Image (cartoon, rainbow, N blue to C red):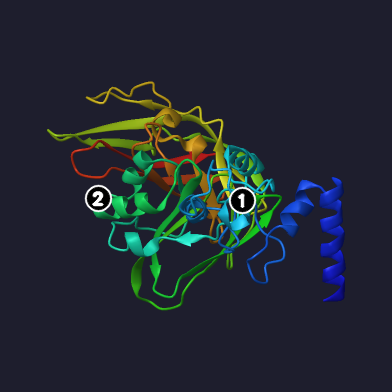
């Protein structure tokens, strides 16, 4: 207690004499909040984060622009003993809004939404309401999630897969220099029941993340492949009247597998060959399914799962990829919200 009193006294003297830094001021003036030692600038309710609840609290205190004396809990964040626009400028320039926020698992809100079948893979990053609608087709779920998320400052990480009822996904966050980093740990379950799993997490916009998958075989490799025209099909179907077009795929593609378990497509120069109502002849595969923009994750052995949004940003894309003895196999496609939308499906083979 003696050391703490001396430190506080020294900070008080520094403040009076003008030798105190903003950082030490933030430490000292987190007063009236019990045992809190170091607070987040803007955190007026002592929950370790600066968010909308803090803004509601300080404005309800009624001190804004009145000139009346105010403390930390009433919006005085620049320590001039009043709450005015200077405090708002200081706190938003500091960049602490939502940066200390714990992961919000919104999964219960989408529990009844249709999910994606297939193996566990990387999350789809959702940055606006349109992408949320494309990912979660249930109107009530979309409305419920939208009420909980501020897309100006947050993104959503959406996990969806089918697997054992014992599958487990846990996220643990750290905050370094104001940036949130999340380590997701996924473990395969051993029960033989097949269940749909959904996970939806709200995170600050500049969040970084990675996934550790149990029993994953990590490989580092960059290999170029050429699609086999006779074994590579691209199917376009749907529409109000209903139609089906079939195209072949030819040209090169490069697959990158990294030591951290991630994977990506580069130099996707392959094109579609064929004719039909969809008029995609000569279009690049990348311009339709955005392969180079998808996030890939190595799962078991030489298997990978890719996820993201199509070039139109209106449909989710999910691909299952494998490599075996110099042969690359890609299966999957995009996931339109209903039968009247155009759907794209790929079933292709490429070789070195």
Q: Which residue is mark 1?
A: 69
Quadrant of image for the N terminus: bottom right
State whether residue 306 appears in this view: no
Res 162 → quadrant: bottom left
Q: Which residue is mark 2?
A: 139
Looking at the image, residue 323 sits to the left or right of residue 195; the answer is right
Residue 49, placed above or below residue 221: below
Identify which residue is drawn at 14% across, 34% down. Answer: 240
The location of residue 8, given as percent across then percent down, is 82, 63
Res 89 → quadrant: top right
Quadrant of image for the C terminus: top right
SS label for mark 2: helix
The Cα atoms of the two marked residues, 1 and 2, are separated by 47 Å
Residue 191, placed above or below residue 84: below
In the current view of this chain or complex, which residue is farthest to the bottom? 191
Looking at the image, residue 147 sits to the left or right of residue 64; the answer is left
Identify which residue is drawn at 82% across, 57% down. Answer: 12
Would you call the spot at circle 1 few (<14 residues within 10 Å), some (14-19), or many (20 or more)?
Answer: few
Of the residues under marks 1 and 2, which one precedes in the sequence? 1
Identify which residue is drawn at 54% across, 61% down. Answer: 300
The location of residue 148, given as percent across then percent down, is 39, 54
Asked whether disc 1 touches disc 2, contact meaning CB atoms under 8 Å apart, the reply is no
């Amino acid at each position: 207690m003696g050391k703490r009193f001396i430190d506080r006294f020294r900070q008080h003297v520094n403040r009076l004499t003008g030798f105190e830094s903003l950082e030490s001021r933030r430490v000292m003036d987190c007063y009236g909040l019990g045992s809190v030692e170091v607070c987040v600038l803007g955190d007026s309710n002592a929950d370790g984060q600066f968010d909308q609840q803090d803004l509601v609290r300080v404005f309800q205190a009624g001190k804004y622009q009145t000139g009346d004396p105010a403390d930390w809990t009433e919006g005085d964040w620049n320590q001039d003993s009043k709450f005015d626009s200077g405090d708002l400028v200081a706190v938003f320039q500091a960049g602490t809004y939502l940066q200390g926020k714990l992961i919000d698992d919104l999964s219960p809100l989408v529990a009844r939404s249709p999910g994606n079948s297939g193996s566990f893979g990387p999350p789809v990053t959702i940055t606006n309401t349109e992408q949320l609608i494309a990912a979660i087709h249930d109107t009530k779920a979309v409305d419920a999630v939208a009420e909980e998320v501020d897309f100006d400052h947050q993104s959503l990480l959406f996990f969806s897969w089918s697997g054992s009822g014992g599958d487990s996904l846990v996220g643990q966050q750290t905050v370094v220099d104001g940036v949130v980093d999340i380590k997701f740990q996924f473990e395969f379950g051993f029960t033989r029941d097949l269940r749909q799993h959904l996970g939806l997490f709200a995170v600050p916009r500049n969040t970084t993340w990675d996934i550790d998958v149990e029993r994953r075989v990590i490989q580092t490799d960059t290999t170029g492949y050429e699609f086999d025209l006779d074994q590579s099909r691209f199917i376009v179907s749907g529409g109000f009247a209903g139609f089906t077009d079939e195209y072949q795929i030819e040209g090169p593609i490069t697959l990158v597998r990294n030591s951290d378990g991630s994977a990506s497509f580069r130099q996707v120069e392959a094109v579609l060959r064929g004719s039909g109502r969809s008029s995609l002849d000569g279009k690049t595969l990348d311009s339709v399914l955005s392969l180079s923009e998808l996030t890939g994750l190595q799962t078991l052995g030489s298997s990978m799962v890719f996820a993201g949004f199509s070039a139109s940003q209106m449909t989710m894309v999910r691909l299952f990829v494998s490599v075996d003895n110099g042969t690359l196999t890609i299966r999957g496609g995009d996931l339109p919200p209903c039968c009247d939308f155009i759907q794209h499906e790929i079933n292709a083979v490429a070789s070195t």
